[in-house]
Image (cartoon, helix red, strand yellow):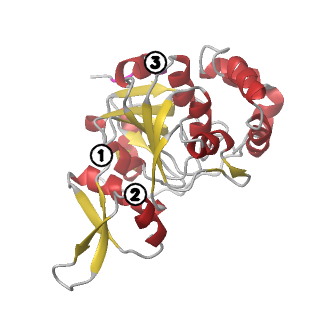
């Protein structure tokens, strides 16, 4: 059965006020289009979780969608702090839990495995343990070492952007792999956005790229250019000037409002957003094909 639907319908059906939302993707494949649709639909009181929050959560914070953030280092990559998110945290207007990068992945791994918690080494977490009561200690029953533990993280909904997916939800990613698989298996509902929707034969021809099986996917949405200003390996480059520009925009509340009104609330969806960026930006972000080598899976 096809799970193909529009992004607007997927967000309306599967993201609810008060949900814990995990927008996955590391460096590339960050689902900005889904975040913008959440903003357009005025979703409220969300707890958002993510290892290394990008400006995706700065924008959702500016729109008033977020009540709490669960994160490891939060920043505008290569530029500095997330100005809006940091200001809300420092003012005490946002609840938060802070972890190390590895602790965030450990929490998702526990959630994906159906475990209540997982242990981890304590290296580099001493101050976080003092600041975050969710870190606990356990004695290794085999060797006697004291280990930190973190609780499972089970999002209400995980949003995964991928290069391609089939209509029934089999999802393939290549390039840098982040925490997409763990977040999806840990979540109650999964929305996949994809640069391309392909026939199942394409998926079966290259099965090792399939990180999500359709059986755990709730909705599949065809959303080209979903990840801008981050990138999608093989499809378009990272928009580094945009990240620099966002630092300037986010320093002034009026500028943020104007940007939101023009680029999020002022467009109907990703196609209109991408067209609005213009041909010069399209050309600047264009990447040349560099095909991966072929392998033989054999035929019986």
Residue count near mark 1 (Cα–Cα under 10 Å), binned few <14, some 14–19, many ≥20: many
Q: Is residue 125 above or below residue 86?
A: below
Q: Position of residue 64 (x, y in %)?
A: 55, 26
Tell me the residue at 56%/44% (across/down). 89
Mark 1 sits on what residue? Answer: 186
Left or right: where does residue 58 sit relative to residue 79? left
Q: CA distance from mark 1 to mark 3?
A: 24 Å
Q: Position of residue 291 (x, y in %)?
A: 60, 51
- Give the residue furthest to the bottom: 143
Mark 2 sits on what residue? Answer: 105
SS for dot 3 = loop
Q: Which residues are magenta?
A: 3-8
Foreground: 256 or 26? 256
As for residue 5 lying within the magenta part, the answer is: yes
Q: Position of residue 202 (x, y in %)?
A: 41, 38
- Give the residue furthest to the right: 280
SS for dot 1 = helix
């Amino acid at each position: 059965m096809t799970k193909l639907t529009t992004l607007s319908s997927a967000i309306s059906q599967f993201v609810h006020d008060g949900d814990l939302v995990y927008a996955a993707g590391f460096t590339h494949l960050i689902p900005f289009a889904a975040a913008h649709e959440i903003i357009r639909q005025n979703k409220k009181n969300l707890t958002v979780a993510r290892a290394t929050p990008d400006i995706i959560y700065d924008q959702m914070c500016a729109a008033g969608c977020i009540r709490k953030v669960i994160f490891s280092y939060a920043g505008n990559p290569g530029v500095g702090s997330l100005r809006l998110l940091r200001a809300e945290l420092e003012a005490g207007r946002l609840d938060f839990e802070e972890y190390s990068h590895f602790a965030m992945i450990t929490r998702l791994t526990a959630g994906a495995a159906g475990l209540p918690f997982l242990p981890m080494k304590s290296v580099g977490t001493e101050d976080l343990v003092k600041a975050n009561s969710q870190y606990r200690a356990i004695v290794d029953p085999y060797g006697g070492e004291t280990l930190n533990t973190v609780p499972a993280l089970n999002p209400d909904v995980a949003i995964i952007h991928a290069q391609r997916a089939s209509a029934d939800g089999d999802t393939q990613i290549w390039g840098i792999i982040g925490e997409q698989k763990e977040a999806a298996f840990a979540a109650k509902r999964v929305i996949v956005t994809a640069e391309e929707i392909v026939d199942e034969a394409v998926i079966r021809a290259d099965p090792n790229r399939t990180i999500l099986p359709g059986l755990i996917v709730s909705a599949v949405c065809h959303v080209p250019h979903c990840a801008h200003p981050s990138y999608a390996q093989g499809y378009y480059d990272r928009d580094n000037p945009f990240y620099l520009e966002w630092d300037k925009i986010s320093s002034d509340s009026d500028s943020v409002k104007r940007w939101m009104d023009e680029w999020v609330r002022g467009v109907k969806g990703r196609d209109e957003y991408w067209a609005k960026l213009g041909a010069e930006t399209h050309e600047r972000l264009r990447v040349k094909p560099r095909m991966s080598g072929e392998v033989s899976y054999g035929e019986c």
